[in-house]
Image (cartoon, helix red, strand yellow):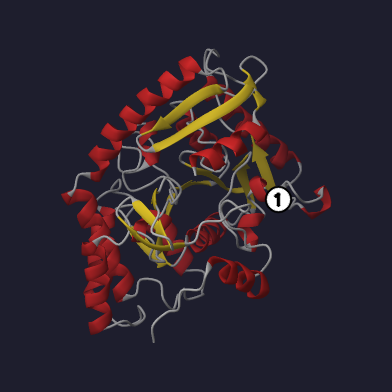
Amino acid sequence: METKIFDKKKTIDLRKKHIGPSCKVFFSHDPIKIVRAKGQYMYDENGNQYLDCINNVAHVGHSHPIVVKAGAKQMELLNTNSRFLHDNLVQYAQRLQATLPEKLSVCYFVNSGSEANDLALRLAWQYTGHKDIITLENAYHGHVSSLINISPYKFHQLSNAEQSKSVHVALSPDVYRGIYKKDHPDPATAYADDVKNLIHKAHENGHKIAAFIAESLQSCGGQVIPPAGYFQKVAQHVHKAGGLFIADEVQVGFGRVGTHFWAFQLQGEDFVPDIVTMGKPIGNGHPISCVVTTREIAEAFRNSGMEYFNTFGGNPVSCAIGLAVLDVIEKEDLQGNALRVGRYLMQLLEQLKEKHPLVGDIRGCGLFVGVELVRDRVKLTPATAECQDIIYKVK
């Protein structure tokens, strides 16, 4: 059956009628209807071409022929769940592990970043026997209930009575807008000490820390690059409290930062998280995600007495697509490309900053780049309306 292409107004009307009203669209005043995409470009129903700087899943380009072929070929052959033996699962796990520090050796495949982070919490709760989670200001880790609880980006809209007492919010390690700025002699220690103080207060109130969770680079929180050494110091405090360190790479992993394959590696070779979660770019738009952890944590989870099973997690088609994405990243040197193009983009943005007082800060690594607009560079007053105006002009 061929899919019909309605006129734009009918699409909007049907969406209003049948799709949940909380599901928003980009550019709500004048939404774009996209009918196809290839490489870095997207096309609307009238054939207009857009350079796609919004999507964070089309990691190796829309409709990449190698990825499409891998998925279609495997779909023609077999798709089933992971209770059956299949080489795609173990080959993919082996390839992923090869990109990570040696001790991160055990994979759990799931279907979304939210599923990955939810499972990471379960692993931490089981391994430590503790319940409390430390998260960062403005963090977002997913849409399921357990993750809304640890996502201030979402739960700050709720009343205090609805916020979980087992969640503790640490200062975002933001050296531009945060308490400890670039001119501070040691912002990494200062921000890590805030985590240390949260742990102390939690212990005073009879709580125990299961995990600290953070995106390796905060994305929804404002493209925040933690100062070097911050994660190491936080990990020391968390481990001393009997907790684990969860690095959320759902938005920033797979070479996007250019210099490294994983964003947590920006902190240095001596830093290794206890759990790493992946999603979005992992399947180039196909719903696949992964949790990678240590053998010790995985064994504790097995000893919980509850089998872990995920119907579609690690199915042959998803793993074939995941393998193809890794092939393309390697063959086309996309990590190197992110570094080269990212540096060029940063140079151009710095030139804009020199010309326009509205540009307060340029920050990023590779093709993970943010521009912060302010009305006053001293007071750092957010230029919210101007930002919205620019978004529509750029569109």
Instruction: Check disc 1: other Cα within 10 Å, few if <14, some if 14-19, many if 20+.
Output: some
| Secondary structure found at label 1 | helix
Residue extending farthest to the bottom is: 1
* Residue 267, picture quadrant: top left
* Residue 41 screen position, x and y as percent: 35, 52
Q: Residue at left 66%, top 34%? A: 385
Eyeballing the image, is 313 above or below 394?
below
Location of mark 1 (residue): 155
Residue type at mark 1 is: Phe
Eyeballing the image, is 322 above or below 193?
below
Left or right of residue 316: residue 215: right
Q: Residue at left 54%, top 12%? A: 183
Q: Identify the image quadrant of the N terminus.
A: bottom left
* Residue 190 screen position, x and y as percent: 58, 22
Judging depth in this view, the residue of 186 and 55 nearest the camera is 55
Eyeballing the image, is 162 above or below 308?
above
Q: Residue at left 26%, top 75%? A: 72
* Residue 39 screen position, x and y as percent: 29, 54
- Residue 95 seen anywhere in this rendered image of the structure: yes
Judging depth in this view, the residue of 288 and 366 nearest the camera is 366
Q: Residue at left 42%, top 56%? A: 280
- Residue 292 seen anywhere in this rendered image of the structure: no
* Residue 328, picture quadrant: bottom left
